[in-house]
Image: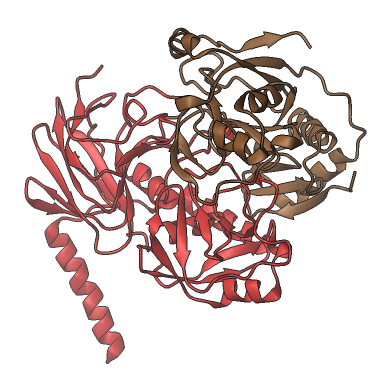
Amino acid sequence: MPDPRLLPCGDTAFTVEFGDAIDAGVNAAVLALEARVLAAGLPGVLETVPTYRSLTVHLDPLAADPAETGAAVLRLADADSAAEAGRRHWRIPVVYGGDFGIDLEGVAAHHGITAEEVIARHSAPDYRIFMIGFLPGYAYLGGLDPRLALSRRPAPRPVTPAGTISIGGPQALVASIAAPSGWHLLGRTPVRSFKPGRDPVFLFEPGDTVRFEPIPESRWGELDRAAAAGEIVAERVAP
Amino acid sequence: MSGVHLHVLDCGAATSLQDAGRRGYQRQGLSPSGPMDALAFAAANVLAGNPPGTVAIEMALAGGRFRAEGGPVRLALAGAPFGLRIDGEPVADHRAFTLHAGETLALTPPKAGLFACLAVQGGFDLPEALGSRALHLRAALGGVDGRGLRAGDRLPLPGAADTRPERCLDALSLDPGEPVRIVLGPQGDLFPEAGLATLTGAAFTVSNRADRMGYQLDGPAIAHGPTGFNVVSDATVAGSIQVPGNGRPIVLMADRQTTGGYPKIATVISADLRRIAQRRPGETVRFRAIGLDEAVAVARARGRLVAALPDALRPVLSADERLLSANVAGNVVDALSD
């Protein structure tokens, strides 16, 4: 793994970058550093944002100097990475195709396979949540079957529905709220990864793993109502 | 419930409640929100007699009308100089004033700038969402039931205005024409010299695509380096200047996306976010690169200025006193020019 380096983000943040690869080992190093930063209780640190390959630390410049705090965090990165602990595994119900996944047939046609084969390949792996970002609860997944990889649409759609399950390049995504997207929409889940008023408001943590479980459209109404009422709906399974 | 409230008779679509913002959830994809002009927000709260960070109304270009009901309400507006009238009588910005029960405050669009904060003594008696009352529109969190203000809203206050004297502050400058200071990075090293030279040398204009999430700028395209315009998504900050494929920079603001896959050439320093925020579509933005040490020094100077705002409060002069003081000042100027 390359040595981490410090990138300035103005006077209120800095980023510790561990390279530019989408790699589970790199991501694990990011999460391990985040845990150490939070445990260290450095003065002036407001919050941390782990991403695929870097950790951004937001701070109050009245209480901390970004260069000094950055150097302190870099020293924490030198420590040996501990094994990842406390990661959880989720099974997420998905209705594929039709109005729920308007690009399923197109993705199948592009790869010269059937829609059923796309579903089988998409629902087979255990994906790692590399990052939660962009919008609240959006979970960016690694582990997509490379035979499904497909570059993003040339023009984004202005609105895609809440709970959209999509793929873009080598990545997969669980969306929470409705938003524009240039990814290919394979299906929808009733699971709310972000739901104000529910405990927990946010369902996932970076480093968790997920697997998709195809369900028939006939189950959508019941699960969606339960999720709207605050149930988790996603199944948490033993590793 | 005190029974005192501010009744929204009408307001612009982008009128929202903001406080100091919602911290701790960027790792879950939720940006902090908070005021677009943090200095105006601080000043409005000082004028209204509030602790720092008290929830206030953020106005964006459009005016509005508000009526006090159930008791008197102490208010103050700071930031862009919206026109203010109480039942037709003009009142100044950057001063506290009292809106008595039944009176209507009318705000008209400012001559310059975009954003102002209308602070209310005591703030609003509304529930927090994830520790804040700031509206995050896309997440439907905070504000009034997760949305902005609209006609018919009755915003409850914890109590009626007290009898503290009304005081004023010098109006805040919107810094028109001042350069917006930036620190290069986090991905400045992905850009060629020519791209960096465009960023710091060119005049950009604020496009029509400017809102609480980000300000897209028009102007010469910023050249990308050989690695192009896609990076593996990483975190953004308020002030991140991302450069998408078309080379037109976007400055990310309070309601930004927390991560992004475009390279971020530089970061607007925290003290100058308000300079960007207050520029209207069509107005010019120039960037000036400074070192990180200077950026921190500027942030701390701003922090001292904000901390000193309560000491800068002055009594509000009556019309006669204002006239007198203007004459005195005029005499001094005359004397000096002789």
Say whether residue B156 is left or right of residue A153. left
Where residue A145 sits in the image (x, y, percent)? 74, 32
Where residue A224 sits in the image (x, y, percent)? 46, 13
In this view, the residue in front, A62 or B144, is B144
Residue B326 position by quadrant: bottom left
Residue A65 visible to an observer of this rendering: no
Say whether residue B185 is left or right of residue B248. right
Say whether residue B287 is left or right of residue A204. left
Q: Is residue B60 above or below residue A177?
A: below
Residue A54 position by quadrant: top right
In this view, the residue in front, A22 or B176, is A22
Residue shown at 42%/45% (left/top)? B35
Residue shown at 54%/64% (left/top)? B246
Residue shown at 77%/17% (left/top)? A86
Name chain A's colour: brown
Q: In this view, does B238 lie above or below A149?
A: below
Where residue B282 sits in the image (x, y, percent)? 35, 68
In this view, the residue in front, A144 or B321, is A144
* Chain painted red: B
